[in-house]
Every structure is written in C-alpha cells, then in structure tokens.
Image: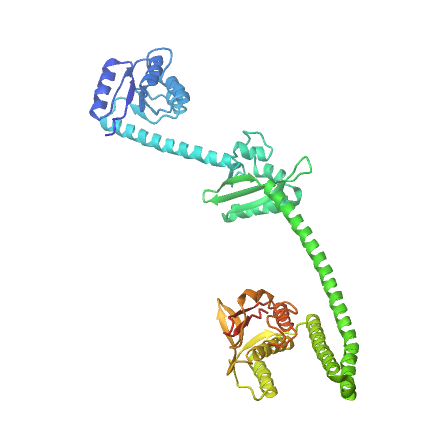
C-alpha cells in the first residue's frame, strides 16, 4: 500500500500551524514536523525528507520563507508552496524568482489547499520525468559526440549547447546568430548553405546538410546538422562532427580510384597479351597447315604408287602417318576457328534457335541416313545473340550429342528451354553414353577428353568453343550426366 505524502509545515504561529496540521491529516497527508524559523526549516528538511513544503513567507529568525525556499532549490529537489497573508508586489516578485509550485493566500479553504497540493505534486512529477529524459538524452548526445541547436526563425539566434559552440569555435555560453554560424563555414559553401537554411525556415522543411568549416590548419573539418522546423517558427536538431567519416570516405575514394586505374592498366595489358597470343597461335597454326598437307599427301602418294615395294608393315606405318596428320589438321582447324571466334565483334540480333537447330539436325541425318535418331526441337526458341556464334555453339553441342548417342539402339536428342528463377535456360539433351560427374570440371578445358579415341573420335576442343561463346554473351554453361544415362548441357545467353 502506498504511504501518504509527507508535507513539512513552516509556520511560526502555533495556532495556525496546528490547525493546518489537522486539516492536512484529515486530507490524508502525513505531517512529520512543524518548523517556525528558517534554520529549523532547513534542518527538518534534511531530517524528514518531505515530499512538499508549505512555507509561510514571514517566519521567525533572520531568514524569511523566500530565502529558505531559495536555499532549498540549491540543495533539495522538493516543491514549495507559499503561505502568506500579504500580497505586496515586491514580495510576490521575490517569491516568483524561486519558481514556487503555488501560492495560498490566507485564509484558504481545504478545497483550495488540497487542489494546490495535488497540482504541485503533478507538476513536480512531470518536471522530474522531464529532467530524467533530458539526462538520458544528454548522455546519448555525449556518447555520440553530438551538440544541440535551437534556432529562432524570426531573430535568427541560436540557443546552442556547449558542444555545439565548441564545434563552431564559440564560447561555451554564447548564443550565436545564424550569421555567426555562416561566418564559420568555408566560403565555397557559405552561400549555398545560407540559401538552404532560408528555404527550410520559410517552407518549414527538414534541414539536413553537411558542410566544411574554416580551419587554421590544412585539415578540413566537416559538420552535419539534422534539424526540423516546427510550426512555432523554431528549428531544432542535432550537430555532429563528421570529419573522420569524410576523411575515411576521401581515402576510400582515392583507394578505389587507384585500384580502378590499376585494374584498367592490367586489363589493357592482359588484352594486349591475349591479342598477341591469339595472333601468334593463328600464325603458328596457319604456317603448320602447309607442311602438314605435304606429309599427308606424300604418305598417300607413296601408298598409291608403291604398294608392293613397301610391304605390309610399310603400308601400315604410312597409313598411320596419314591418319595422325589428318587428326592434327582437324586440331589446327579447330584452333583457328576458336581464334576467329574470340576476334569477331558481337553482332546482336534476335536469333531463331529452333530453326538453326533444326537445320543442323537435318545436316547430321543427311550425312548418316542409316542411323535411327529421334531429334526433337522445341518451337519458338529465340534469343538476343550473335547468329554466327550461336550457330557454332549449337553445331558443337548437337554434334556431340549425335556422336555420343551413336551406340544407343534408338538415339534421342532434345533441344528445348526452361525458366529457372526468371532466367531463360536452353538445353541440348541426349540418351547416349554420358559421363561421370566427378570429371565434369574437365569438360570445358581445351583438349580435355573423357573418352578414348578408339571409343569416340574428336579434337577435345568443341566444348571449349561452346564455353567461350557463352561467356562472350555474358552467360553460363554447365552439364548434368550419369554414365550410360545420357547427358544434358544447359546454357544461358544473358545479352
């Protein structure tokens, strides 16, 4: 149960004091003591710790009630209500400066007494709550190293906290004007900042700006003000020194610029190296073709002109030389084709993938009419891509599917599309021999083959070409397979 409020009575007339004590106790208050002089009042406040003091202005001793109340304001947060039979203007003016919680002019009714006490308690509670929140706010501002501003839109004068004045180089207790603040701003930003202040004050809009201050050294200091203009023509907000963040942003920007320049230099060097390497590869491959043709041609000529002189072993060796030469010629052709693909500029347009895949399938079936192959191409497959490069991509994938499904009784090859998380994914799928996914990382490497030559012939460069074409379009390519269960190659064309 809540204990009754404790009220100290300061009254030097004993009859009046006793009567007041009785009336207070009847109203439910506790009166722990009655004081008759100023010093006794101060002693009893220390001893009894009352919740409120009813203070007669004219009391015994060398201090009146107003002087006692003034001392209590300095030492105790206890509300004071004055009791007086006098209402001289000079007395009331002295009493007003002590910020009392009420006046009761003698004589007064119990109703007046109770109402005045309750209003004093409510005011004291609100002031205590406000002081508590102000302390919490100040702690937060101190922790964030922020100051406070309160600008009068009419007088253009600031009520600034000590931290705010320190940020602008003003005395701690100064009340600078808007002109004083602007005088501290870097001249290159002063006019624009003044215009933004005026715009916020006139339109009652939020003000949030960062600006540089004038400094005595070469290190720039940056200040940020976040404030709101209220209908009472006052702008209130917080001030913060953001120099550390600005300097960090500047260093990061310099670092990024340097890194970007370094990346551009290295990229240019890499492009030049790749260009030179491709030119060298093209030159070497091109120059190899003539002697290679001579080796293959002369081998065949010897077999044709001197079959009996060479004997069976000699014929076998020459045939093997010709076969190896043909394989090497195919590799050179593939290398030249890959080099040309990297040098060709992209010519983007809408490509009819369905039509292109159907034409390649028809050519494959025409070349081997005896094979039983079911090729299904989904209709309306389109993409924004380079038609020449996409034709090479499809040709390599379909020829792979055709080759690796050769041992299936009824080969099946599907060309289609599906949507995955909003992305268009094309695929070429077969029911051929497949491969082990443990070796999938070797699929797209140049000259990397997962099957022996005597099983499935090839150069080992077709999927490398597929990957480069897809990458030039900003897409991805990957495969899924199981041995004996066929393979499915998926690719995207992001451009």
**Residue 474 relative to residue 68: left or right:** right
Q: Is residue 492 above or below residue 145?
A: below
The quarter holding residue 324 reads bottom right
Q: Is residue 31 above or below residue 2?
A: above
Residue 457 pos. (x, y %):
63, 77
How is this picture coloured? rainbow
Q: Is residue 473 above or below residue 251?
A: below
The quarter holding residue 211 reads top right
Residue drawn at 63 percent across, 67 percent down: 445
Question: Which residue occupies the foreground of this view, 23 or 441?
Answer: 441
Residue 398 pos. (x, y %):
58, 78
Quadrant location of the N terminus in the rendered image:
top left
Quadrant location of the C terminus in the rendered image:
bottom right
- Tell me if residue 36 can be seen: yes
Residue 59 pos. (x, y %):
32, 14
The residue lying furthest to the top in this view is 61
Q: How many numbered marks does the figure carry? A: 0
Q: Is residue 442 above or below residue 175?
A: below
Question: Which residue occupies the foreground of this view, 372 or 118?
Answer: 372
- Tell me if residue 379 can be seen: no
Residue drawn at 66 percent across, 36 percent down: 215
Residue 473 pos. (x, y %):
61, 69
């Amino acid at each position: 149960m809540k204990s009754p409020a404790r009220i100290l009575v300061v009254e030097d007339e004993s009859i009046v004091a006793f009567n007041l004590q009785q009336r207070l106790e009847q109203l439910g208050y506790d009166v722990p003591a009655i004081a008759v002089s100023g010093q006794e009042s101060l002693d009893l406040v220390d001893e009894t710790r009352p919740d409120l003091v009813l203070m007669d202005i004219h009391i015994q001793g060398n201090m009146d009630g107003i002087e006692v109340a003034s001392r209590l304001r300095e030492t105790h947060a206890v509300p004071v209500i004055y009791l007086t039979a006098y209402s001289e203007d000079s007395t009331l003016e002295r009493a007003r400066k002590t910020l009392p919680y009420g006046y009761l002019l003698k004589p007064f009714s119990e109703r007046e007494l109770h109402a005045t006490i309750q209003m004093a308690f409510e005011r004291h509670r609100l002031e205590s709550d406000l002081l508590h929140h102000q302390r919490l706010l100040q702690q937060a501002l101190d922790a964030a190293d922020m100051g406070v501003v309160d600008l009068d839109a009419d007088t253009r004068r600031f009520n600034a906290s000590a931290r705010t004045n320190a940020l602008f180089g003003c005395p701690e207790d100064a009340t600078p004007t808007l002109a004083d603040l602007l005088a501290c701003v870097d001249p290159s930003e002063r006019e624009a900042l003044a215009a933004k202040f005026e715009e916020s004050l006139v339109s009652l809009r939020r003000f949030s700006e960062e600006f540089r201050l004038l400094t005595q050294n070469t290190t720039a200091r940056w200040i940020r003000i976040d404030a709101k203009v209220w209908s009472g023509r006052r702008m209130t907000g917080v001030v913060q020194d953001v120099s550390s963040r600005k300097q960090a942003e500047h260093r990061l920007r310099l670092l990024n610029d340097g890194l970007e320049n370094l990346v551009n230099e290295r990229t240019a060097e890499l492009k030049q190296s790749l260009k030179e390497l491709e030119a060298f590869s093209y030159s070497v491959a091109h120059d190899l073709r003539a002697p290679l043709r001579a080796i293959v041609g002369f081998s065949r000529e010897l077999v044709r002109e001197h079959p009996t002189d060479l004997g069976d072993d000699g014929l076998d060796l020459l045939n093997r030389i010709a076969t190896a030469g043909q394989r090497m010629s195919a590799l050179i052709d593939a290398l030249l084709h890959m080099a040309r693909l990297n040098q060709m500029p992209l010519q983007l347009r809408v490509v009819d993938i369905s039509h292109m895949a159907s034409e390649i399938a028809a050519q494959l079936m025409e070349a081997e009419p005896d094979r039983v192959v079911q090729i299904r191409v989904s209709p309306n497959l389109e993409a924004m891509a380079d038609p020449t490069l996409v034709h090479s991509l499809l040709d390599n994938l379909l020829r792979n599917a055709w080759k690796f499904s050769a041992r299936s009784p009824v080969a099946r090859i599907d060309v289609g599309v599906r949507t995955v998380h909003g992305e268009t994914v094309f695929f070429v799928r077969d029911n051929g021999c497949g491969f082990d996914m443990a070796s999938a990382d070797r699929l797209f490497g140049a000259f990397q083959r997962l099957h022996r030559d005597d099983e499935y012939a090839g150069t080992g460069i077709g999927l490398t070409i597929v990957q480069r074409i897809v990458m030039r379009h900003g897409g991805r390519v990957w495969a899924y397979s199981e041995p004996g269960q066929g393979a499915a190659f998926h690719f995207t064309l992001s451009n």
